[in-house]
Image (cartoon, rainbow, N blue to C red):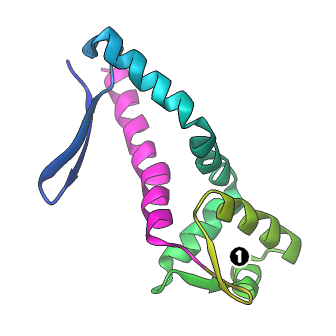
Amino acid sequence: MTLKLKLVRDNKTLFEIPLSPEDWEKEELENEFNASEDEFRKLSKLFDALSHETRLRMMRKLLEEEDHTMGFADFMHELNLNPKIVWENSKKLAEGGFLQKTARGQYRCPQTGQTAFIMMSLALRRLLESVEEIENL
């Protein structure tokens, strides 16, 4: 059985990735691994930004807002966080590209941050669940 990850936009396949090393040509897989190493800093910032429950809660709250914007005080009150926690976690989210400061005390999640958050938190979770199901067959 061949397992693949496929990204589709408007019924057009943007890319398709086999998820088993056996389904790759050796040289092609090596090139992909090398490219991943080159992008490690960028990937590391994404994973680091989402590796804490507070930051996940902040992102979820932001995406629930119609304009994907919240104030510093809103994070404190709605998530029951102290100012230091909001500041530290908003800094990590900004470093990962998930937050932009728009005005004094206002933060928004740009489109790229929204897409990355959905991909990293929701799509990866579902992908891992699918892999676990296959292993248990």
State the image coordinates of residue 118 (x, y, percent, origin top left): 44, 58
> Does residue 59 sit above or below 123 in this rendering?
below
Q: Which residues are magenta?
A: 108-137
Q: Quadrant of residue 5?
A: top left
Q: Quadrant of the N terminus?
A: top left
Q: Quadrant of residue 54?
A: bottom right
Q: Horizontally, is 59 left or right of 13 in the view? A: right
Label 1, on which residue?
79
Residue at point 76% right, 87% down? 73
Of 78 and 22, which appears nearest the observer? 22
Q: Is residue 76 visible?
A: yes
Examine the structure image and report whether residue 130 is included in the region drawn in magenta. Answer: yes
Residue at point 40% right, 21% down? 31
Please identify the residue farthest to the left as the structure is shown. 11
> Does residue 44 sit above or below 62 in this rendering?
above
State the image coordinates of residue 46 (x, y, percent, origin top left): 59, 50
Please identify the residue farthest to the bottom as the structure is shown. 104
State the image coordinates of residue 137 (x, y, percent, origin top left): 30, 20
Q: Quadrant of residue 85?
A: bottom right
Amino acid type, callout 1 = Leu
State the image coordinates of residue 11 (x, y, percent, origin top left): 11, 55
